[in-house]
Amino acid sequence: MTVTEQFATREAVRRAPATQATATDAAARPRPAGPGPLAVLADEGLEVPVLGGRFVRHVNLDVAASAPALEVVAQQVTRVLPYYASVHRGSGYPSQLSTSLVEDARLAVARHVGARDDDLVVFTRNTTDALNLLAGAVPGDTVVLDLEHHANLLPWRSRRLVEGRATIAATLDALDAELARTPAALLSVTGASNVTGEVLPIDRLAEIAHARGARIAVDAAQLLPHRRVDVAASGIDYLAFSGHKAYAPFGAGALVGRSDWLDAAPAYLAGGGAVDAVRVDGVDWKHGVERHEAGTPNVIGAVALARALAELDRLGDDARHDHEQALTRRLHEGLAAQQGVRVLSGFGDGFGDRLGIATIELERGSVGLLAAALGAEHGISVRAGRFCAHPFFERTATRANGLRASLGAGSSADDVDRFLDALATLIADGPAHAYDRSPEGWCPRVDDRPRPDFALA
């Protein structure tokens, strides 16, 4: 049977549990019904092969890394693709349409995040790209916390690092003291930790920064797909986020914020579109968004991002919050009942507002092996490592690596339960197959999972 035939006939395959290992009593205990998916994602109903020749419904608990496209986003991209063309100077109808789509997407982003009328919306590749752009515009020191993703640790030219304290209140005091000690141009903080899901009080952080004469930038890569972010109402000066975490994985992100620093900064890319005039002996650079968007823009990415944000608006803030909080409680309560598992937390003062993210470490064994077995034997995607937040992880963890499960708008109670059951089984009985450790991580010694034709060379 060819690979294509194996995938085409999977509906006829008996989809029994991926392994015959016996679950622990905790895993086997019936749980009450819970919420289903809030939104339809492009991977809805996806079935993946597991070791032994079976197919199972995929459980995606790695959306904090990259989320699948919303189905309406995928449909929008399909509609737009035939009209894709050059922008801003083309005379044909597709070119003029592509230009309007980009500029309409810019307005849609501004509306969704509550930008001020004179804020710029610069399209970037992702959050990392957006923060690197901003780093070239900051006229002085940047203060950051040690809990940041590397995207918000590494770009700053003159960085002052503040170690987080045991409580959020003490951490805010430490930031205030550092900003008071020596003036800084910018405080740059994450909206929510990608390791623990803990949400920071952005409004309060903005007040602290402004009281000390600094501006504030927010890395909203994790926060924006899960919570309403309002730039003007919260006093945020700069906001950076990625489409690929907001159900629009087509290579676009954005930097939203005040124009003066960006207009005074060197053009982020030197090239066509960023200039008013080029002479043999000099260049006249544009101001505004064009100054930092040289070259052909990612039309499809911008369109996808705008459509994703519109769908988040349609779903509604309350519905998104209630759906995620119900699943987050289910996940954390289930993990609390597991043996040999510790859930990481950055703050110990009952700071309970968190996204649907849980990172665990094991008392014994390898989380890398556990993650590999969850994928290969149970069809459950998670992530193992230190999550591009090494300083924070090293401060909060006792083991070298952790395992992260993350939820999104397409997650369901069944997803959480399957993860908890599989986790209990693997901790109690170990993997049902042999694995070898390679430089790329743990891999099945014999991997009989087929790949679809489009993934073959």
Image: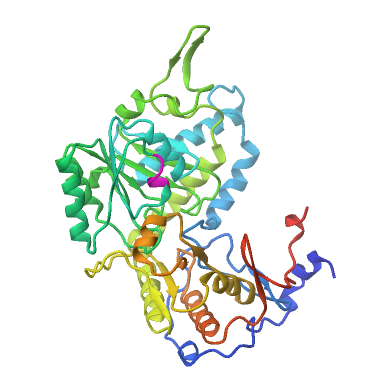
Residue at (54%, 61%) from the top-left corner? 41
Place residue 292 in its image quadrant: top left
In the displayed orientation, state which residue is furthest to the bottom: 25
Q: Is residue 129 above or below residue 11?
A: above
Image quadrant containing the N terminus: bottom right
Q: Nearer the viewer, residue 183 or 95?
A: 183
Residue at (42%, 78%) from the top-left corner? 341
Looking at the picture, how far across and down is residue 168, in whole percent?
22, 60
Q: Nearer the viewer, residue 306 or 55?
A: 55
Q: Is residue 153 visible?
A: yes
Relative placement, left or right, of 62 versus 320 is right
Q: Is residue 121 visible?
A: no
* Residue 84 is one of the magenta-drawn residues: no
Q: Nearer the viewer, residue 343 or 64?
A: 343
Residue at (50%, 74%) from the top-left corner? 415
Residue at (34%, 59%) from the top-left corner? 317
Instruction: Tally the numbered discs.
Output: 0
Magenta stretch: helix, strand or loop mostly: loop
Place residue 436 in its image quadrant: bottom right
Q: How did the renderer colour the structure?
A: rainbow
Place residue 374 in its image quadrant: bottom right
Q: Nearer the viewer, residue 316 or 223?
A: 223
Relative placement, left or right, of 373 versus 24 is right
Which portion, as a residue range, is magenta?
Answer: 151-155
Looking at the picture, how far across and down is residue 306, in whole percent?
46, 45
* Residue 154 is one of the magenta-drawn residues: yes
Q: Is residue 123 above or below residue 88?
A: below
Relative placement, left or right, of 79 versus 36 is right
Looking at the picture, how far across and down is residue 419, in whole percent?
51, 77
Looking at the picture, how far across and down is residue 395, in whole percent?
34, 62
